[in-house]
Amino acid sequence: MADWQEIPGSITAPRGYRAVGMAAGLKPSGLPDLTLILSDVEAIAAGVFTTSQVRAACVDYCRERLQTKASARAILCNAGQANAATGVLGLEDALESAQALSQALDMPSELILLASTGVIGQRIKLDALKAALPKLVASVSEDGAESAAKAITTTDLVTKAIALETTFHDRPVRIGGIAKGSGMIHPNMATMLAFVTCDAAVSPPLWQQMLSRAADCSFNQITVDGDTSTNDSLIALANGQSRTPAITEAGPEADKLEAMLTEVCIYLAKAIARDGEGATCLVEVQVSGTTSDAEARQIARTIAGSSLVKAAIFGRDPNWGRIAGAAGRAGVLFNQDHLQIKLGEFLMMQQGQPQPFDRAAASNYLRQAALGAYLKEDTVAIAVSVGDGSGSGKAWGCDLSYDYVKINAEYTT
Amino acid sequence: MADWQEIPGSITAPRGYRAVGMAAGLKPSGLPDLTLILSDVEAIAAGVFTTSQVRAACVDYCRERLQTKASARAILCNAGQANAATGVLGLEDALESAQALSQALDMPSELILLASTGVIGQRIKLDALKAALPKLVASVSEDGAESAAKAITTTDLVTKAIALETTFHDRPVRIGGIAKGSGMIHPNMATMLAFVTCDAAVSPPLWQQMLSRAADCSFNQITVDGDTSTNDSLIALANGQSRTPAITEAGPEADKLEAMLTEVCIYLAKAIARDGEGATCLVEVQVSGTTSDAEARQIARTIAGSSLVKAAIFGRDPNWGRIAGAAGRAGVLFNQDHLQIKLGEFLMMQQGQPQPFDRAAASNYLRQAALGAYLKEDTVAIAVSVGDGSGSGKAWGCDLSYDYVKINAEYTT
């Protein structure tokens, strides 16, 4: 059983954090587009960023910053322009925005981290951003988490936010998080951003390790369309304001903190997959029986990302052959005579042999799961076992609908 | 300049080959579904098969056969049931079909290769197949290539066939080929099959090397939806009936034969991509400036397979940012400041900086290319350069349309 509970407040639930989101005129729509997350004191900072060779200026900026010093006090996020594939001019814009916020907050610019989301190839509307900074700084508060969660979105249908609380030495320790996903209703909007706050005290290398591992089994295990953004960023702060003893090495306390951090990341990752463009349902793929967890995650991600599997789920077609096909091409060796496939409670393949099942009932299961998706109750569950190994892993995705094509094609240039 | 010319006749254009396709009652539709390709004499045989861990019985059968002895006289292909993910029973069916053909042809069964395409998880309708064999064997002829090209298709919109001729020592040498692609109008139909005949004399290891290299820059460089079939098979025969001297080692003659073989494979591969389910146009991606050809092919394949790029092309949206994004996540290191992107004649990015271009004209280019697609005149051409390296490569794909989703989702179970 998890020894934590969900609490309100997302990123400002941990002590010593304030946030705000506002409309600064960066998005053509006039919707909120500028976000500030602020820690009262210097916080340990860790980050996981896109692996793409084509990266946004903010990603290069944050990577370099965190390599020099793994701490920060502020995260500034603009939505509307991705500032990716903008070359040296884009990097200058990023530096100038950090410099401007540094003056407005009266703190060294090396305590500021940056994130951007929006149209690739467009530079930040720097004048509008700078003009909005005084108001942004004046508005930041402990009640601002909701506006921040809103302002980092582009065309997400819902905001994604959570906070969990546990106790260390009888004192509360909290982790909060917000995220945006890939609701690409406008072209080129395709960024996964997540910001996590924590009030535990933890050593920088340990915090980075925890975050990297948490990302590997959460954000790195969701797929909407297989495209990796130029701007993907996950940044996590830990400011020690819980006043609990510092966690500086592996052990039960580190495990407990990492488990809660992982839970926050998985919650946000699933929320992103559920809100994938055009999606009508969340698909959870569980794979077991591999030699390693990494192999299981690889197979799970391949199944969740298969266009054929996704289209079949949209069509409410219990098409296990496509699941078998996707598992087979995942790049992980296994003996197909050991393959087992379940869709919900329906056993479709065992020991590599097709099994008889009630197709109408299985199709109805898919229909019901989709209906329940936005109530966050039901999920299309695919379970695959490929052998006797102890490895296991999960991945999350969504179905492939007409609306995906519509959202991504029907844009008049 | 190519020193070969296109000739009619596809797989029976090379000397000493006969073929036939007929309706054997394997497909519910009653359309042609059984194919026989026959060499008058024992031919050198090479094969390239799916890399999936979930394979059809015919794939395992052919792999084992060719490892034992790299020659064959006959290829039997059934359409309708993929005989994949059918376990040991499926393998028994495959062996039985080879045995039955062996009796009908009065030749050892080890001279027979097998291929299947159709619904995953369904075993071959063996009774219908065996009942049809006498008529199949009686009908095989030098005029049967067209019926064979038709009978290997499932829901392809067009048949794919070609033959090329060159001369060695003043004698004609010919290579013919037929293929089927992934017109997955029924669920689970997703197989790439290609059969190539050649009348040159060539040593077995050299022929296999040529075929593997040709596959690497043709069939392995097309993508319709990123899913790899359980049944993908490319089989090539070389029977020596051109009566030209045997080619047994690397050199100008081997190079010439391999170039023609590669041309046949590329022609068939492009025809498959053009006929991808729901496709309205062929997309050709050329990548240069990498360290190796393999890296260039990897980037090209990633761009051609990107759902976002494909949806943009369907929307006639000259969305170069998505091309940059796909190039960046291909898993190949490069400096984004050296990135250059062209769509047709439109230069969109140079030295990593966005370039001004006429969006309306570029969108019109996409519209025109799509209109021309089925006339085989025009293609959407994407050219990407990532540096100064000498590596280059191409990949082919198609756009992502509403019909793709419709074809793959709207099947009532």
Image (cartoon, coloured by chain):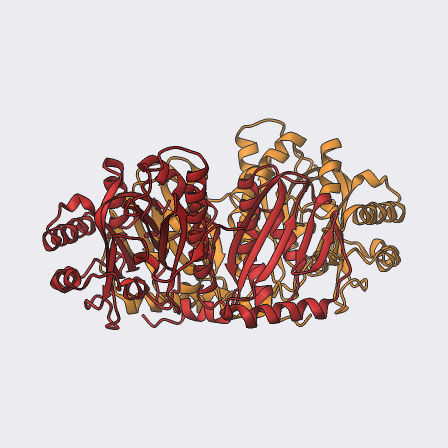
Chain colours: A orange, B red
Q: Is residue A228 above or below residue B29?
A: above
Number of numbered callouts drawn = 0
Residue A249 percent coordinates (x, y): 59, 26
| Camera-nearest residue between A365 and B14 | B14
Residue A371 at x, y = what percent? 45, 69
Q: Residue at x 65, y 43 (%)?
A: A53
| Residue at 65%, 33% in the rendered image | A202
In which quarter of the view is residue A254 placed? Answer: top right
Residue sitting nearer the eye, B250 or B305: B250
Would residue A344 be visible to someone looking at this image? no
Q: Is residue A326 left or right of residue A157?
A: left
Q: Residue at x 10, y 51 (%)?
A: B106
Between B18 and A192, the residue placed more toward the observer is B18
- Is the residue A71 above or below the residue A154 in the image? above
* Screen quadrant of the C terminus of chain A: bottom right
**B138 left or right of B58 in image:** left
Report x, y in % for residue B210: 40, 41
Q: Is residue B61 above or below residue B250?
A: below
The residue most toward the top is A249
Where is residue B318, by image quadrant?
bottom right
